[in-house]
Image (cartoon, rainbow, N blue to C red):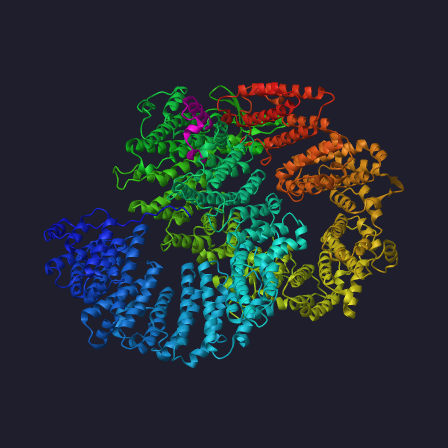
Amino acid sequence: MVLKKKKNVEVGRIILDDQKLASFRSIATGEENSLVNLLLECVELKDGIEQLHLLKKIGSLLRKLDTNSVHNSQTGSCMEILVAIYWGLESKSPLKRATVSTLGCVPENLQEEVVGCLVSCLRKEMLTVEKSHVRKTIDSIAACMENFSLGEKCMQVIYLEVLQFLQTALLDFKLQNKSLGGQHILQNKLMYDLLLALKTSMVLVQKVQGKIHGIFCKNPEPALCECMCGLLASFTDIIIDGNFLQTVQSSAGMAVLLFIKTIVERDELLPKLVHDLLYNSTKRVHDAPGWLVRSCGGLYRAPPPDDAVLFLIQGTLTMLDWGSGSMRDGGDQLLLDILTTLLLLNTCLQESSMVLSVSRTLSFWTTSALDALHSDTCSQHLKHSLNGNSESIQKLLGYVWTHWEHPLDALRYQTKAIFKNILKIHQKTIEGSTEETDLFFLNLTQSLLDLEWHIKGKYISLSCLVEYLGTDYILTVDDSIPKQVLGIMHEQSLATYATDLLEKMFIGHKNQLNSSPQSSNWIEQWHKTWVLPFLTALCDEKSSQTTTIIDHYLPKLLKCNPDSLTYMIEELRSSDKAGKNGALSCRGALGALMTCLRTARAQGLWSTEDKSTWDQLIPVSLIKQALVHKHEQVRLDALGLICETNRTTEVVSQREMDLVKFFLPYNLNSQFPAMRQKIVWVMRKLFYRIRDSSQILYKQTQAINRQKISGYEEKANNQDPETQLQQYKDFLMWVCERLFQALFPGASYPSNFIVLSLLGIIAELSDDVEGQTYRVIQISDAMQPAYADALLGCLNSTFEEVKLLAYDLMRKLPATLFRLQDGEKLHTLLQAALDLSTSTKPYDCVTASYLFALLVQQKGFLLALRACSSKQQMTGDQFDGLSKTDGKQPDKETVETNILEVIKYLVNCLSDEIRQAAKSLVHAAASNPLYGRVHCIIGTLQQLSLKSVTKIAEWRQIVEGLISMAFHLSTVVSPICQSSSPEGLIPMDADLETAENLHKIISEIKPRDTNDYFAQVKVMKSDEDKETSRNLPGDCNPAEDLSMTMTDADGRSCQVTAQMVLVCCWRSMKEISLLLGFLCQNVPVQSVPDSKDGLLAFHQVWAIGEYFKYQLLQSRHRGAFELAYVGFIKLTEMFTKCNNSDLQKLTLQWLEEVLQEIKSSAPSSKLCATRRSAGIPFYIQALVSSEPKCSNMGFLKLTMNELIALSMPAVPLSGSQDEHTTIPQVHALNILRALFRDTKLGENVIPYVADGLQAAILGFMSPVWAVRNSSTLLFSALITRIFGVKRGKDERSKKNRMTGREFFSRFPTLHPFLLKQLEMVANTMESDSGVLKLHPSLFLLLLVLGRLYPSPMDGSSSSLSLAPFVPLIIRCGHSPVYRSREMAALALVPFVAIDRILLTAQSLMETLPAPTHPCIRQNQIHGTLLQALHLLRSCYDSKQRTNSCLHQELHDIIDCTRAKIWLATRQNPCFLTRATFLDIIFILCHHLDVSNTVDPQILDFWQITHHIILDSELFKDSQKFLPAPGLIQWQKSITQLTLSVVAKSVSLRPKSLSRDAICKLASESAEIQPSLLLPHLLQSEFLEVRLLTLETVLFWLEEKDFLQARETDGNVLFLLSGIEDTLKKLAVQEKHPACLAKVLKILCHLDMEGLFPWIVNVSVMSEAKLLRWILSLADTTKSSVELQSATLNLASKLVTHLVQKKQEKSLDSISEELKQWVRLVVQSCVVEEQTEIRLTAAKVLIDAVPSLLANRQLYLDLPDILTLWRCIFTLLQDEEQAVRDKTTDVIQMVPSFLTACKENDILYSVVNPSLALDLGLGLLCELLQIWGQVVPGIVALVEWMLEEDDVEEDTVNETLGEYDVLFDRSEINLWAEKITFANLLEKHLSRLISHSRAVPDDESHFCLLSAKACDQAQRVARLFEGLPPAAEFSRTADYTRLSIQKVRLLNTAQLLRLFGLGAIIVGHF
């Protein structure tokens, strides 16, 4: 039972004019149920519903009538009345449909009379020529032909008159359209009227088509001919005229063909007439019939435009009968010609709407082709022409390949429909053969499978093919498809396509397996194919990558085969995955199990109503484990498993409620926003389940009570419903109390968000909903005064979302709960709101706004406002209204009055402050920032619907005052926002020259300030600068201070900074814009000037528009004009919706004016030419986007055409260009950028992309920097618009690329342009002079071309081929600029097909010169090598090539490489080309299978590589290298190659050898010896060599999936044998931080025992000495995060090693070092440290748990152990989620002797930080008992409670914290909750004291604690007394800090009370 709100349906009412009603009453009879009386009663009723019922009754009576039952006069009168009723009703009215039904019941002998009445009435209606009546008449005509037989008979009678009426209406509509330019509302209404008339004429002609056709075939009537031809002429004019909507033109195209078809005598004549009309209209005009030439003269006088041809084709395909065969062979040829024309139109029409129309038309064409093929008279020629291998179908397939990735969803859908129809067409042409053997289907399948999986069209096409070939065949070709598709489904954009494919495949596979002869074991194979890959991905993949799989794939899989759930559960619980926790980013088997069960339950596959179901599927303990799992998705799935069902009325069991109780405390503080939203959403489902199921339970309770009263009681098997309802109430009460308790001071934002959201949902349960008979709980029942105060305090949160949630919740609760009826409290809160509205902190005015919104709802508000106003000493009669109100008005009037008066008050306050600001902006910024008042005015106005106010006159004055105030305020603050450098207006710079320049800016804007703050520039000076500053002019002498001391209104001093002044100004501008925008959007405008129906006058609207125009065109501050744009958007939207034509025309007028001003570029123009044209793009963007989407986008076309023309350079690369002449071009480029980025314009800007890209590339060649800069920004915006937003870091990813065919098909003009530009660029690379020539557009061209790639589906399309670009890109690689060569290499890769990569690389290598070549150009060599290198990388990275394909090509490339090997040797003097050649060798060696080959060519190449390495300068020469270009690259390349060869050589050696055997083998190894090469590399003088070597060694040790490491440890040991001494030496001698860090990390991976004895340079270092050295190193490495982390890690490894040896003496000897190590750990845990260091500290503490922190023996002093535990608790409350999650692993390291004795369902394994904090404190208390340190431990832990905050710094001074830093939000850690930790600590200490029965031997420690706590309590109480009223708002930080300390002290008192102490502490509070 789902409770839903009932929708109200507007029925209307029957109304007759008085004359007809009086006439009808005169014939009434005395019979009660006679027809006349019933009809009279019906028309006299006032209720439309009752009239509807009477009409039905009249219809029943009419069925029973016969000829003699009533008099003919009465019957005729009744029929006339019914017809009059019919014509008087609206066409969509239910009453009109009922009237039609009633008239349909008229007996046959009366039907002719009814038709006569209809004809008579219609003729009268058509005589009326009023415009509004014409639309109604057309509606009535259309309704007559819609399921109304009598209406159709009427049309048969007067069809000619109706056609003539429609012809007149169409002509009139066309004339009106010409006079409505710019009036979008009227234009759109007219278009729909025109469309209705057009469609009505078509329907009418179709209804009487046979009659009209017969007349034309026999003897055409002149009137009919004239009418038909006139309508045809009107349709033709509409098609040609571009001022009509495309829907109208498309309908006109169908109408043209319908009329031609109706007039033409025989169908076989139609193909020729239509063909001539489409293709040869001007040439074949003499062959056409005269009536057709006269009617379609516009088509015959000139070739029709492309869009007109498209509309005619649409009509041809729709209106001609292709399946009957009546058009003979001419129809077949016409059908094929239409396809050719459509494919041609696709390249000509670029507007998105036209592109979509072409696609739909092609889809219509395929449907028509199918109809033609199904015809019995279908010719063989047509079948052959439509075969899948025919030229026509191949071209159509090319269209599919080009458009299946189109950004328009509708077009992709049409593409799918086209492809499906193509398959059907081909299937029809091959009837008699099977699809499995047809070459077309097989080749198509293979081609599709060869494509990459990022292409959406691949999934769509394969889905279609599965229907024909079956899943078995697809899996036979490639059985890895399920795994591959599941692997790509993490891409959100591909998920739905991939799911559709997989669904079709697994459903088809199931059916095929079921129907096969071996179907007994089909389920196992099906599970292996479809379920097992899903479970593997679910367990092992990251959560972010499996979300879409769960949402899309899993539900459909379970729906296909519900029994698979059992298989999933068994597989997940029994597999080895269940014992693995996996990485943090993976959910593991437990998470996968929760996911599957949640989805299954949501689908209704299993229910939890039976308790045994839980135990059968999964134990409750496992669910509890999942509810507190570290992985957030696992927790959410477990919660969803509990809450989500397929029935909202399913009863919530006690077990489910207990699990929710367990979940909530540990999951309120969730840091991820998405997780918080999902928790709230899932809990909402639970609460609504409780609400809906409680209705059923309540009804059951009532039924049981009735049975008890009647004496019959049935024994129920289920739980008593009354008991269940009580459980619901107890549960919700517990939830409310728990949530309210979480709203303590200092609660984190995540907790506040979840708590308030859940409380808001519970409050919704109390709302009145239709059908709700029982309410489980009223949230007010759970409220307490403390909870109400906590909820009210949420309004002071710095997060506006929390304020909004709290405010919404308070609005749902009675005001009495917050004691707002108390006048004193109301006054206190109102005063706080008024104070906050002038705060210098921007978020304080938001709090004030919410307070005002809450308080204006109270009746006592006016009295409180009067009390507050009396303090302000305001003068005048501005508060006279306060005395006139008695507070006893109805609620709505009270609220309106309150809002009216508070706005008056705020406006008057603001007016005084504006006057003060006009004198001194600095003073205003310091004491009364103006924006706060305006923000509060807006927030208060939002509480009232200004369209339904009652005090019109007063509100008009208020609106006028607000507008005037806004303009005045803008005048004061706008000079700063409009200065040429607003952000730097208040000068604070370090040099005097800048100070002088800023002084000029100040002189320029001349701010209205009377103090000297603006007259002086401020310079950050040192002592020696003071003398120099005296040289400045007197009026520019810099002040010494960076801030200025001012006094506020109360005489308090405050510091004013530049930031405060700037924020005051631009935020004021922001609020003004929002206020004016709000007024435009919400205040009703006068319908006509001087009318009394609106609050906003026309001249005020115009003034607001002029204000926005001024601000947008002249503001320089981005914050100011961005918000002005928001307000201006609201204004333009109001223009669009209003009915005033003058206001509607303003938009076009402003647009034309600003475009003209941009073009003129007058010196007097104030348009900003810098700062990306400032607000000008926003201004034009607002004007253009205000145009309705359903219009023809005339504003956009006008703007784009003008801007494109301006953006194109008149003379490219002209030296005469300067900054003044190019200002229009700069503006045009900047505005184009904004328009292309505007998402509102969508695909409407696509037709201009090609021109925009040309403008950007040509503009980049301008000599003026401003043009180049704007061109670059435009280019960037266009790349994003074309290829989409970049979604990954991989620059070469094909996600943001497209095929060349698709790109150039969408933008055909770019193909010749880019080719020409690239040829010009390439020609500059061929200079023999060696002079550096860098073409400006080279980078842009390569960036564009680099985003294109060839597709296997491209075929042999010639005109748009990518082939001509390849040689030009290769030539661009010869550029003398390194970056250009690199970009050319990257751009070349995608242009080469996959099967041509190695051949192209080989041809490039062959072009390299021999060493004896007379002219060796290193730049050219390097460019060629880079291109070959990137091609080889692409080849080996490709997943589509097999090793067998590469074998021969690999031989060829090796031959080329050997032939040019001199480039890698000393013979080549250029280090850069040597490095690149070595990179090529590295790639080849990396992919050589040396171990399994006997190929002499490969082995020879391997030996050559060895010699290159050993003969290089790195190993042969001892002299130092001189700096040379490419030296560093060469060092890296030779090192990388050496390490690769070393690793490859080691992998050839025998495996699993002992250490001695490995050492012996190393000493005997020839050529490549790791024991010699690695130390040589590690000791190299070059930093890059050492660093790369160390990184590689560290990789060998860390990477678990590294091939040699996975197979055997022997290879790694062999690689590292003999380098331990080198590493020790490096550790002591290395100076570079990065290298030293890598060395220390490597040492951490080695066996600590094997590192000793530590001998370096003959000296031996002991373990203790080594520890001291590492700790001393840690003190000196603060600058390097990596080194600091490595030092901490190594020191901790060494400490753990020493502890594990359990040598008491040795530990005593290093006790000081251990304490130093503890201090190091503590320093690494502080919040100021980098995240990486804190993560390392967490890892160190985790490793120390078994040996130190949770050991039975206490190796360290108790304070040190407790300090380390304190570090764990600190990290568990860290700001970073990664640090917290890492630290939770501490719980997994707890020894078994601690976990074995626990009686809890929660395993100490993978838990979330909140539970880990709770468990950790419990473990520590248990360890204190094991160590026998209970009393000292209690003392230390209580001191934790008292030492967290240092209240010594607090004073009683009321000004404490009054002027903090702007935007300071006090607490840094937004996750930690100090009260939560204090409460947990108190809980576990209480248990420890109770269980251990601790009796202190010496009570002095506890007495000292008590005294300390008493002293703190006394100070805190004194500070509380010193706070002002409503301190939670005015002094939030102090109030919160003191409240937290109060809770700690009360907890301390509770603990001390167990020892008989602490009572006095409570007394202070």
Compared to residue 1593, the image places residue 1455 above or below, namely below
Counting labels gives 0
Magenta highlight on residue 419: no
Residue 894 drawn at (x, y percent)? 34, 29
- Please state which of residues 475 and 1204 is positioned toward the viewer in this rendering: 475
As drawn, which residue projects farthest toward the right?
1658
Magenta highlight on residue 820: yes
Compared to residue 1011, the image places residue 1236 above or below, namely below
- Please state which of residues 1505 and 1641 is positioned toward the viewer in this rendering: 1641
Identity of the residue drawn at 49% across and 57% down: 1254
As drawn, which residue projects farthest toward the bottom?
380
Residue 759 drawn at (x, y percent)? 48, 37
- Please state which of residues 1881 and 846 is positioned toward the viewer in this rendering: 1881
Residue 306 drawn at (x, y percent)? 38, 65
Q: Is residue 1037 visible?
A: no
Q: Is residue 527 left or right of residue 281?
A: right
User: What range is drawn magenta here?
Assistant: 809-836
Residue 1114 drawn at (x, y percent)? 43, 40
Quadrant holding the C terminus:
top right
Q: Quadrant of residue 1712?
A: top right
Q: Quadrant of residue 1043?
A: top right
- Please state which of residues 1769 and 1646 is positioned toward the viewer in this rendering: 1769
> What secondary structure do most residues of the magenta stretch adopt?
helix
Q: Quadrant of residue 505?
A: bottom right
Q: Is residue 505 left or right of residue 54?
A: right
